[in-house]
Image (cartoon, rainbow, N blue to C red):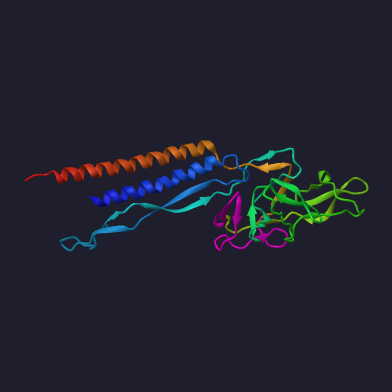
Amino acid sequence: MMRSLWTAASGMMSQQTSVDTIANNLANVNTIGYKQEQTQFKSLLYQNLQAKTTSANGDDKPVGAQVGLGSRVSAVTSIYTQGALNATDSLTDFAIDGNGFFAVRDTNTGDTVYTRNGHFTWATATEGVMLSTSEGYPVLSADGAEIVLGQDANGEDYKTNLITIDTDGNLLYPDESNNPAPIGIKIGLYQFSNPAGLDKLGSSYLGETEASGVPLNEDYDEVGKKSSLRQSYLEASNVQVATEMVNLITAQRAYELCSKAITTSDTMMEQANNLKR
């Protein structure tokens, strides 16, 4: 009877992790570029109650006698479906339509991290202005360099309010005829063969791992389908509140059932202990 106690307890712990994941999804429902997470479960080892595959008469049995010992969390997987693109008033807001990621250099560690959050700004740099995140991390170009604007062909400082981009990520600036023209800098976009394997670093940043595979530069590497950029747009979270509420109720009911199993097992043990000859 102790088996049922530990089995039900494992179910309660697994469902608690599921509730934690759902709560995190709901907390990030308005986080730019956030991707919904799902808890995946796996059954624990099975115990053989009868190892032999024959009956007492030596006849073959079609099935054995095994009992499961509960469940555990096998993974918390991010679902990388496209979020809605919401219009903004900022020229430094960029949304990715596709599977790409922005590359950002973490100035604290020097590592390159990745994000779907395109809420950028122009920050003051030694050679002009630099496209950076709200934390001050420089955004990287398709060549892996920081995007820094100094002076244009006429020797004048770039006016950031005139900088636009095309859908490929090329930075454009008005030429002598006041027509947007490329200035030779392109915002880098990278893809991964298994984005669910990326390491979550917090603040919407993701790190490369062996499970995710190496980053594939959309300009130079072979990718299934290239992404496109939308200026003055931001990608909303792909969390569906109604779906999360249904998942929350399901996890709560499963938690209650496991709790009921523990209560029932405890009552049965109490009755067994009170038996008298």
Depth order, front residue of 183/49 = 183
Q: Nearer the viewer, residue 224 or 109?
A: 109
Q: Main secondary structure of the magenta part?
A: loop
Name the one closer to the observer, 256 or 55. Answer: 256
Farthest residue to the left: give it.
277
Q: Position of residue 103 (x, y in %)?
A: 68, 56
- Is 1 left, or right, of 161 in this rendering? left
Viewer-closest of 238 and 65: 238
Residue 12 picture location, percent across and down: 36, 46
Residue drawn at (71%, 42%), measured in percent from left and top? Answer: 233
Q: Residue at x 24, y 45 (%)?
A: 265
Query: Which residues lie in the magenta part?
Result: 196-224
Q: Is residue 244 left or right of residue 112?
A: left
Measured as percent of width and height from the top left, residue 123 is found at 75, 49
Q: Quadrant of residue 151?
A: bottom right
Residue at the (76%, 55%) spot, across then down: 147
User: Residue 55 colored magenta?
Assistant: no
Q: Is residue 206 shown in magenta?
A: yes
